[in-house]
């Protein structure tokens, strides 16, 4: 007879997935004793379940006897990402129709973010990212929106493993500068990629609330078009899109939770609709769009510095591979 947890599903299945999630959370590999300490199961039970997973290819045992995720999970993850992206396509198309710039959706995949859907801008000069591409979290709009949902300790360990390359002079190269930016993101409710991935490209992004896996949606384009006026339209449009995607994801998962709480960084209008402007007014400083309360003189973040408008905008080109 199958084991069952009281009032829940099959207990052994729940235990298997808990083990897989703990291995994934470990960021690489984990020992039997570490698993025992985190899941509260007897070592013989954990060993028996892991041996089954190894035999099926969903886990693997390393030469040092630690355990890691197995290669058969890749196919399942790719299939899930494709379906997740397909589910979000109507909302991404609405964003492009409303704003005229490229819309993306990405999810956290180990220590990176992977793009699962994109609807391109109709403009000849537009941002383009290949679906399936993996990029760093610390210098992309979607990545920072996702990181802002995580505790500081997890953010530090994630960027320590992945590294913090600085592809432009605006990129952040230290955990301290990133954490300061994440505080600002939590305050205002959305992230800004201020030419941190590619010069001449600006992006606004927002996390999907209550998603089964950390996910975010973004709109991006050349700085000549994606300015403060654009932001006033983009932020409420993003808020509406991520709420719709959240509802669809939870409906597809078989549950219908209460509507996600309002984003604390956004003003709300009557009947729960997003107001037309961000909670923190945006201003243009040189070539950078920043919240008016940002302390550019003291935050030591390179992205707060201005670039000559002509030089930065000139780097955005038709078919640019700028990510957001």
Image (cartoon, helix red, strand yellow):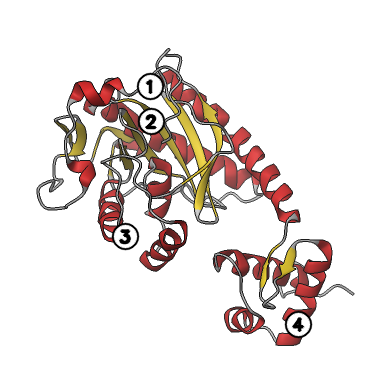
Instruction: Spot the residue most to the left.
Output: 297
**Label 3 Cα neighbours within 10 Å, binned few <14 / some 14-19 / many ≥20:** some
The mark found on residue 45 in the picture is 4
Precedes in sequence: disc 1 or disc 4? 4
Quadrant of the frame with the N terminus? bottom right
The mark found on residue 11 in the picture is none
Q: Nearer the viewer, residue 248 or 107?
A: 107
Q: Could you give the CA–CA distance between mark 2 and mark 1, rounded to whole angstroms?
A: 8 Å
Choose top left, top right, bottom left or bottom right for residue 51: bottom right
Against 225, residue 188 (above or below) is below
Q: Could you give the CA–CA distance between mark 3 and mark 4, rounded to whole angstroms?
A: 39 Å
Choose top left, top right, bottom left or bottom right for residue 28: bottom right
Precedes in sequence: disc 1 or disc 3? 1
Quadrant of the frame with the C terminus? top left
| x, y percent for residue 239 | 39, 37
The answer to whether mark 2 and mark 4 are in CB contact below 8 A is: no
| 157 with respect to 88 (left or right) | left
**Label 4 Cα neighbours within 10 Å, binned few <14 / some 14-19 / many ≥20:** few
Between marks 3 and 4 in the image, the one whose residue lies nearer the viewer: 3
| x, y percent for residue 68 | 66, 67
The answer to whether mark 2 and mark 1 are in CB contact below 8 A is: yes
The mark found on residue 175 in the picture is 3
């Amino acid at each position: 007879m199958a084991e069952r947890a009281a009032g829940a599903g099959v207990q052994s299945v729940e235990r298997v997935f808990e083990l897989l999630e703990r291995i994934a959370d470990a960021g690489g590999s984990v020992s039997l004793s570490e698993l025992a300490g985190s899941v509260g199961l007897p070592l013989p039970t954990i060993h028996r379940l892991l041996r089954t997973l190894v035999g099926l290819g969903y886990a693997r045992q390393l030469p040092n006897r630690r355990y890691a995720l197995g290669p058969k999970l890749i196919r399942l993850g790719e299939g899930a990402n494709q379906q997740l992206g397909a589910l979000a396509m109507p909302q991404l198309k609405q964003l492009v129709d409303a704003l005229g710039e490229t819309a993306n959706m990405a999810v956290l995949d180990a220590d990176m973010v992977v793009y699962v859907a994109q609807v391109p801008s109709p403009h000849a000069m537009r941002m383009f990212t290949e679906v399936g591409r993996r990029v760093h979290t610390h210098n992309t709009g979607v990545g920072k929106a996702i990181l802002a949902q995580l505790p500081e300790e997890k953010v530090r360990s994630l960027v320590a493993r992945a590294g913090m390359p600085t592809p432009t002079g605006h990129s952040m190269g230290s955990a301290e500068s990133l954490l300061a930016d994440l505080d600002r993101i939590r305050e205002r409710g959305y992230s800004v990629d201020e030419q941190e991935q590619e010069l001449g490209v600006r992006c606004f992004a927002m996390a999907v609330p209550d998603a089964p896996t950390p996910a975010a949606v973004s709109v991006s384009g050349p700085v000549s078009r994606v300015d403060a006026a654009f932001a006033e339209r983009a932020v409420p449009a993003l808020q509406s899109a991520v709420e719709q995607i959240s509802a669809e994801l939870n409906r597809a998962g078989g549950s219908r939770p209460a509507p996600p709480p309002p984003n604390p960084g956004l003003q709300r209008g009557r009947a729960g609709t997003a107001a037309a402007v961000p909670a923190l007014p945006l201003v243009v400083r040189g070539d950078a769009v920043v919240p008016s309360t940002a302390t550019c003189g003291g935050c030591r973040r390179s992205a707060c510095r201005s670039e000559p408008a002509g030089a930065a905008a000139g780097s955005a080109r038709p078919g640019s591979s700028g990510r957001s």
